[in-house]
Image: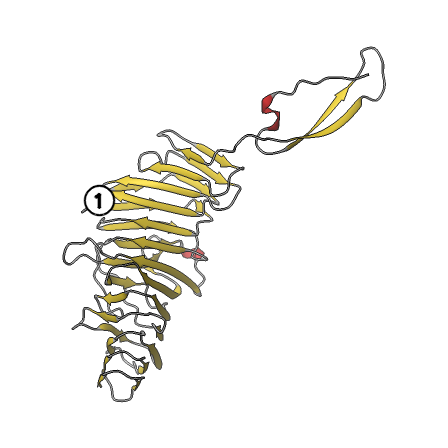
Amino acid sequence: ASVTFLVAEDLSFEGNETAVFSATIAGIFGTPATTSVVINDTSTPSVQEVLTIGTDVVNNVSAQAFEIVANEATLGQNDQIDSQLSGAILNIGTDASFNIANFDTNNVETFQFTTSNSDGGDGFIDMRNANGVKNLNINRSNLDSFKFDDLQSAANLKAVINDSFTDYYFNFDASALTGADSFDVTFSEAPIDAASGKRLGIVANQGPTDASASIETLNLESTGSSANNVLGVISVGSALKTLNITGSVNVNVHQDIGKTQSSDLGNVSGNSEINKIDASTLNAKLFGGVSGAFAYTSSVKGEVDVLGAIGDNTLFLDTSNVTGSTTRFDVLTQGGNDAVTTSRDNDTITTAGGNDTISA
């Protein structure tokens, strides 16, 4: 005898499912005949979801690199977004100033922003319930400020900033930092289309009071096709011990990174406890806005190692007036035409060629 079953389309849900079928004969008692079968879902999985102005619940279980499309009006409203597969992207387009909050994401690895009509505006996004974020990508911003608030981890987190002259504020949940964390920022075309005086700013802080961040290492990568990338502010605070600068485009740092610096949202902390600045793999020039020099005023009690870029270096290295500050700079440059100025006569400056000018 045979029994035919009619299987409804929704039995397989999403993906492959195992179903158990059983049959009994009316009026005859005994063990039912059973069999297990695997039902294969052969439909093409959705690779994109567009959020609405209401509460959206998105659960991706079938597509790698799943994309969620949103804007400043549709992301929020207690949206619940989850991806069971890797590579999910939340693609957010914004118009003018914005304040985005009240959403949850899990395993959405990349937040990708494109701003428009943003000149003179401010951006804010509350990241307290965004778990598993690895990439913060921003393209073409001329906002005055953009704050990522309450980031849940610095581990494996990277910001990629293109064609922007905005001051970015990366605020971390204080409990998420260990004191030995690093943070990676890659920037390009900064600022390729900016009016005079516009610059890119990078500020890392923590907690509800925006205190200095407990980040030990900051890795900066300068890329793109413009002649120079201009940084108006680099601020982490006294926990920062190592600053690495790599890439292929000239880096122009406008303010003294060891002193209190100005930013769009007010003054921010200097990084006066850096004991190593390594630009040895920057295949370009390193200079700045303090009489043309990249400037660092240190309060380190001990040695500070400075490894210059492959191209020309213009450096001004000073010791702060903090009581007991006894910084001794050990500077090594490469084959470029370098100009190095330090404030004391106990510093060591070694050059490897080029037409160099040394002042101490």
Q: Position of residue 262 (x, y in %)?
A: 20, 61
Left or right of residue 354, residue 52 in this image: right
- Nearer the observer, 180 or 167: 167
Quadrant showing the C terminus: bottom left
Left or right of residue 253, residue 238 in this image: right
Quadrant showing the N terminus: top right
Q: Position of residue 273 (x, y in %)?
A: 33, 73
- Nearer the observer, 262 or 226: 226
Where does label 1 land, which residue?
118
Quadrant of res 10: top right
Q: How is the image coloured?
A: secondary structure
- Nearer the observer, 211 or 313: 313
- Is residue 231 visible in the rendered image? The answer is no
Other-residue count near label 1 (Cα within 10 Å), few / some / many at <14 / 14–19 / ≥20: some
- Is residue 90 visible in the rendered image? The answer is yes
- What amino acid type should be assigned to the residue bearing mark 1? Ser
Q: Position of residue 179 (x, y in %)?
A: 43, 64
The relative height of residue 79 versus residue 259 in the rendered view (above or below) is: above
